[in-house]
Image (spheres, coloured by chain):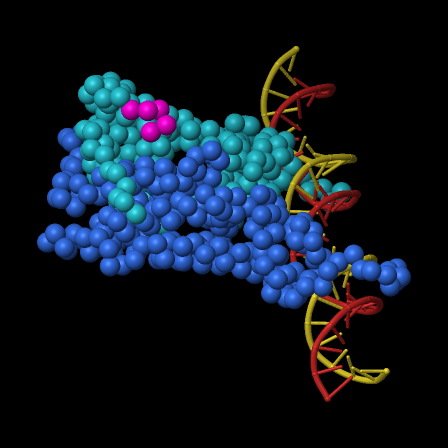
Chain colours: A cyan, B blue, C yellow, D red
Amino acid sequence: MLARVSSTPAYKRLPRAVREQQMLDAAVKVFSRRGFHAASMDEIADDAGISKPMVYAYLGTKEELFVACLHREGTRMTEAIAGAAAPDLPADVRLWRGLRAFFGFVGAHRDGWAVLYRQARGSQPFAGELATMRARLVEVVAGMLGHALRAEGREVGETELEVVAYALVGASESLADWLADHPEADPEKTATRMMNAAWLGAGRLLHGATWHPPQV
Amino acid sequence: MLARVSSTPAYKRLPRAVREQQMLDAAVKVFSRRGFHAASMDEIADDAGISKPMVYAYLGTKEELFVACLHREGTRMTEAIAGAAAPDLPADVRLWRGLRAFFGFVGAHRDGWAVLYRQARGSQPFAGELATMRARLVEVVAGMLGHALRAEGREVGETELEVVAYALVGASESLADWLADHPEADPEKTATRMMNAAWLGAGRLLHGATWHPPQV
DNA sequence: CAGCATACCTACTCGTGCGTAAGGTTACGC
DNA sequence: GCGTAACCTTACGCACGAGTAGGTATGCTG
C-alpha cells in the first residue's frame, strides 16, 4: 500500500558489493559512536542510505554485522602492519616499521578502528574474536624478539617472551587510545616515543640485564 | 493480593548498609560477566537474593548502580596502590611496590575489577569516570619519573613524560588482563616481569639513552 | 500497645528495537 | 517485449527489560 506512483525512485540501485561496503562503513561509524548495544539497526540502515531489511538480507543479524565490521577492520590493520614489517630485516627495524604502520593506521581510522577495538573487549561474543587477533599479534612480536635473542646466543623461556610481547602490545594499544583522543597528536611522533620506551627496555633485556625485587 | 499467609518469611531483614554491599557485590559480578547492557536488573537483584525494587530504592537507576560499582572498586584499588607506594622512597622501589600492589589487587579481584575495567571503556557515560581514575594514575607515575629525572639533573618535556607514563600504565593494564585470564599465573611474578620491562626501559631513558628513527 | 519508619514483596506498564512478512519497481537475458 | 531475479520499500509482531504502584511484615519508640 501507499505505493509511490511510479516516478523516479528516491533511491539508486547499486550492486551488492558496493552496498555491503556502504553498510559496513555506516556500521563502523555508528557502532563506534554509540557502542554495540546502544547502536540501532535503524540508525545504521539510515546512515547507509538504505532500509533495514537490506541490512538483514546482506549482512545478517546485528551480531553478525558487528563481527563483519571487526573482521574487515582487523584484516585491514593486520595487512597494513604485515606489509610494513618485512621478515628479513633486523629486529629493531622491523619493530619500528610495525609500530609506525600501526600508529599510522590508527591515526587514519581514529573513530573507526580505535573505538571498535574498545567496544569489542566487553561483550562476550566478540571478546574471543578480538582475542584471536591480539594473540596473533603477540605471537608475531614474541617471535621477533625470540629471533633477535637467539641471534645473540641467548635463551629465554617461552612464557617470559610472551609476557614481554604482551606488555609491548598493551602499551601500544594504550598509546593508540591516547592518540585517538588527541586529534592534534602526530602518529609518527607517537610511534617514535613508543619505540623509545619499548626498544630501550627490550634492548636492555636482550643484552642480559635483569632486575630483581629488593628485600621487602 | 496473594499475600503470604503470615508465617516465617522467606527472606531475612537486614540493615541497609549490609544489603547495599550485597547488591554491589552482585552487580559487579553480573556486570563483569554480561557487560553493562546485557546485564539485567532482575538478574542482579536475584543474585543479591533480593527483589528489584529494593535495588532501585537503595542504589537508583541502572546507570547509577554501575557508577556506584565503578566507584567502590576504583577506590579500593587506588587505596591499595597508594598505601603500598609511600612517597618518600626511591623511585624504583616505589614503582615496584605500586606494581606489586596493583597486580596483587587484580589477582584477588579477578572477575570483579578486571572485567569491570574492560566494561567501562566502551559506553559513553562511564568512559569519563574511568578516564579520570586513569588520568590520576598516569599523573602519579609521570610525577614519579619526573622526580627521579630531576634528581639526576636531567630535564624532559611534560608531554614526553606523560606519554611514557601512559605506556607504562597501558602495559600494566594489558598484563592485568592477561593475569585475569590466566588463573594459574602468579601476581607477584607478573609484577616482576612488568617491572623488568618497565624499569629497564625507563631506567635506560633516565640515563639519557635515546633511540632515533633510521632513514626509511 | 499505638504509631511510625524501615525493610521487603508481587505484579504490573510501557517504551524500545530486533527481526520479518508481504509487496512494489527496475534491469537484464532470451 | 516479457518473465524473472535482484533490489528495495513500508509496516508490523513480539520479546525483553527498565522502572513503578501499591501493599505487607517487622521492629523500635513512646
- Identify the residue at image location x=15%, y=36%: B212
Q: Assign the magenta stretch its main secondary structure.
A: helix
| Quarter residue B7 falls in | bottom right
For residue C21, above or below residue C1: above
Q: Is residue A201 visible?
A: yes
* Lateral position of residue A64 relative to residue D17, left or right: left
Whole-percent x, y for residue A24 in the image: 51, 35
Determine if the magenta segment contains residue A152: no
Whole-percent x, y for residue A142 in the image: 33, 26
Query: Considering depth in this image, is A101 or B154 the residue closer to the camera?
Result: B154
Query: Considering depth in this image, is B99 or B145 the residue closer to the camera?
Result: B99
- Find the residue positioned furthest to the front: A215
- Identify the residue at image location x=36%, y=37%: B189
Magenta segment, which residues?
A156-160
Q: Is residue A23 visible?
A: no
* Lateral position of residue A180 relative to residue B196, left or right: right
Whole-percent x, y for residue D4 in the image: 71, 19
- Identify the residue at image location x=45%, y=43%: B107
Query: Considering depth in this image, is B110 or B170 the residue closer to the camera?
Result: B110
| Quarter residue A193 falls in | top left
